[in-house]
Image (cartoon, rainbow, N blue to C red):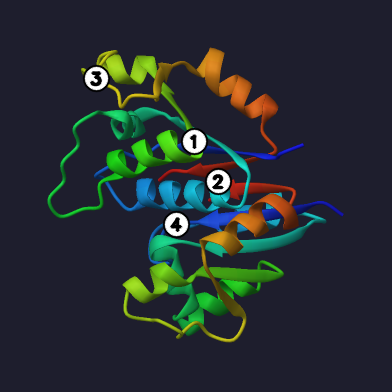
Amino acid sequence: MTKTMVIQLRTGSMMSMDSNVAVKLAKAALEKGYNVRLFGYGEAVTVIKEGQDPRRFPNVGKELKELVEQKGLVVVVCETCCVARGIHRGEEIKGTKVGSLTNDFSKFVSEGDRMVTIAR
Amino acid sequence: MTSILFLMLKSPHENVNLELVDELGKDTKKAALLLEDAVYYAVDKKQGKHLADHVDEVFVMADDLAARGFKGKASGRFKEIDYPEAVEIIMERYDRTITI
């Protein structure tokens, strides 16, 4: 049975290199044949915002979109954290999901084989 | 024996409590994986020795070391790795990961 890596990301897409580490780790795991679930909490909900266009940073949104579409990455972020930041359903990158700790993250944790927390 | 991989992201000059490694890793095989500014442990002799005294092995993300101008400069007890190797270590070689 294919093992699953769960990545809990808690820092935003422009705050540091944390989100880039999460993307690189997810990509490497997917390419090695593992399932990967990424849950964004707190500032990390910004990673699923459609239309990110950073001029001087790697485009985490674009990279996530490619991994979702081409490699089967599952990305869910906390709805309460989105609402707090004015990010609404429909603004997320296609294929990602605005979900919840109780319904989604708890399932990821219970079904995952390893969990990696990337946070400050 | 269980095993724990400690993920470290912060510079040794930030507030990093290595006593946690001892407390959480009692009677376990322990390793550290250094990412982002934590790679400075690998090139700072004093801080590096301090960290290496708390764990059995230390892995350093080569990309992050190179990004900071220290490509290939990790000291002896620190093993430079890439992302596929990091995945292997996380998924197959250690039972759990804890970020400190």
* Subunit of label 3: A
Residue drawn at 27 percent across, 17 percent down: A84
Label 2: which secondary element: helix
Compute the Cα span from label 1 to label 2.
7 Å
Disc 2 versus disc 3: nearer the observer: 2
Point out residue B49 in the picture as x, y percentages from the top left corner.
57, 79
Q: Which residue is mark 4?
A: B9
At label 3, the amino acid type is Glu
* Subunit of label 1: A
Is A99 or A66 nearer to us in this picture? A66
At label 4, the amino acid type is Leu
Asked whether the residues under the numbered discs 1 and 4 touch, taking CB atoms below 8 Å apart as contact, a structural biologist would say: no
Compute the Cα span from label 2 to label 4.
22 Å
How packed mark 1 is, by other alpha carbons closer than 10 Å (few <14, some 14-19, many 20 or more), is: many
Q: State which tag comes first along the sequence, 1 or 2.
A: 2
Compute the Cα span from label 2 to label 3.
25 Å
Label 1: which secondary element: loop
Point out residue A92 in the picture as x, y percentages from the top left corner.
29, 23
User: Mark 4 and mark 3, same subunit?
Assistant: no
Is A63 or B11 nearer to us in this picture? A63
User: Mark 1 and mark 3, same subunit?
Assistant: yes
How packed mark 4 is, by other alpha carbons closer than 10 Å (few <14, some 14-19, many 20 or more), is: many
Label 3: which secondary element: loop
Q: Which residue is mark 1?
A: A73
Q: Which residue is mark 2?
A: A30
